[in-house]
Amino acid sequence: MFITEPLPTDRRARLVFGLNWSAYPVKGVRAERRRYADDYGATHYVEMKVAGEMLGGFAAPDAADLRRTRLFSGAARIALLERVKSRPAVLALLQNAHQVFLVHVVRGAVRNDEVLSPEAAKARRIEIEQQCLRQNLPLVTFGSGALVGDVDEALGAGELLKQKSGRISKLPVSVPPLIPVAVIVIALAVFGGKLFDIVSPPPPPPPAPPSWQEQYDAAVRAVFASKPPVASILAPKLLDTFGDVETNVSGWQFDHADCAATGTCSVTYRRAGGSFDGFERTAPPTMRPLAFGRDGLSLTTRGPAVPKVPAIALARSKQWLNEQQLIETLQTPPQRLSVKALDLDSHGYTVRLDPPARVLSAPPAPGDRHGRLVLQGNWEIDGFRWQAPLLAALPENMALDSITVSLLAQGAAGIHFAAKGKYYVLD
C-alpha cells in the first residue's frame, strides 16, 4: 500500500494505492464486509456498487497516516471516470518517481490495484494483456510517465484531483462476543429451566486436523495442478520456433528469447545501427507491445506463443525412471558424443541435476504406513540447437519450466539454449 503526499486541491486529503479488492453480494453486505476485512487484517474500507454487486477495497493504514487526514482510493477514482466505465477493460499506469501505480478495471470493477517497480509493471502489463486477449476483452491503456511505455490515451493526475469520490472509511466496531453471552446468562438466571427447551444443542466439536497422508495428497495435487509440460516435447518445439529466426530487424540484432512453460515468449534485440523510432515504424502487430531499454542499447518485443503439449501424468508414476536410472539416461547420450568417458560436458552440452526432495517437507509420523512418495528436483541443461535430439530423448518424468534461446554466432550452431525444469521420481 502507498499513500501519496497531501493533494494540492485539499491539503488534508491523500490518495491511496495498493488496496485489496473483493466482490460480494449487496444483500448481507455488513457480514460480508466484516468477513473480508478480517481475512485481509483491514481496519478501513471503501465500497462501490458495480453491476448489482458490492465491490470493496480494504486497507490497514498506520495510525500516523490518519492524523488529520482524509484518505481516498486512487483505484476507485480511476474506475469511476466516465471514459473508464464506458470501456470493457482499462489498464491505467501512473508513474510516481521510481514507482508505477497499476490499476486494472474490467466493466467498472477494479481487478488489480498495485504499486510496482517499472520492471514488474511491464511484466504485469503483458500478463494482463494476455489475460484480456484470452477473454476476448478489448483493452485500452491509459497512463502517464516515461517509465510506463506506450499508452493509448493519456491519464493525468488532474483528473483524479477533480474527483471527490472514493473516500476510505474506518470499519464500524463489531459487537464483542461477550455481550450476547451476557444476555444469555441473564436470561438463564431469569427464566431458569424453561430456557433450556429453547436453546439449541451445543455445536459439534471442531474437526480433527488433517492427517499426514491427507496433507501429502494435497501437496501432490498442488504440484501437478499446474499441469507441468513434458520437457521432451515442449523444449524441441520451442527450439524449432527460433530455428529460422530473423536475426536482424531494422538495424537491431536478435540477442535472446525467454519462454516460460505457458503464455508468450519475449524476445530481446541489441542495437546494431538502428533506432527506436525505426523499429517502432516497422514492427508488425505480432511484436507489440514494445519495451525500449533505458540504456538505449536494447529493446524487448512480444515473441511467439508457447505451444500446448501434454502434461506429466501422475497416473504413470509407476513407469517413471528412478533417480539412478534418470542419471544414467541423461549421461549416456553425452558420453557417445564426448571424447572423454564419463564426461557430462560434451561439445557444449551440459547437464545439472539437483538432489530431489519430498513434495511435503514434514516427515510421516513413526508407524505411519504409506506407499511410495513423490520426490521433486530441479534440472538444467545447456546446449546448442543441433543437440535438440538429446532433449527429445529426455524421460517422461521431466517437466520444462523455462528456456532461454540466444544467438552466440552466425549459423545454426550458434543458437544456444539454457533449459530449466523439474523432474519427479518415486522414493
Image (spheres, rainbow, N blue to C red):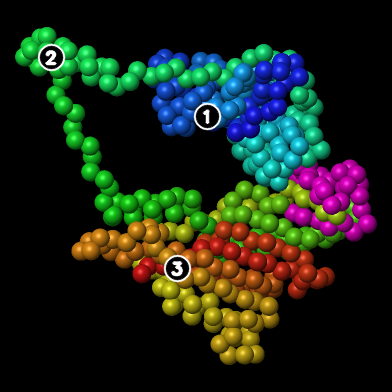
Instruction: Tell me the CA gap for discs 2 and 3.
Output: 62 Å
- Which residue has dot 2 on it? 188
Residue type beneath disc 2:
Leu
Residue 246 visible here: no
Q: Earlier in the sequence, mark 3 or mark 1?
A: 1
- Element marked by disc 3: loop
- Report the residue at 44% width, 63% height from top: 376
- Which residue has dot 1 on it? 60
Q: Bounds of the magenta span?
A: 267-296
Instruction: Tell me the CA gap for discs 3 and 1.
Output: 41 Å
- Which residue has dot 3 on it? 356
From the viewer's perspective, is residue 379 above or below residue 79? Answer: below
- Element marked by disc 2: helix
Instruction: Tell me the CA gap for discs 2 and 1.
Output: 40 Å
Q: Which quarter of the image is occupied by the N terminus?
A: top right
Q: Earlier in the sequence, mark 2 or mark 1?
A: 1
Q: Earlier in the sequence, mark 2 or mark 3?
A: 2
Q: Which residue is farthest right?
A: 273
Residue 322: x and y in percent read 41, 73
- Report the residue at 47% width, 59% height from top: 312
Classify residue 363 as left or right of residue 242: left
Quarter where residue 206 is shown: top left
Q: Residues within 10 Å of mark 3 (few under 14, many from 20)?
A: some
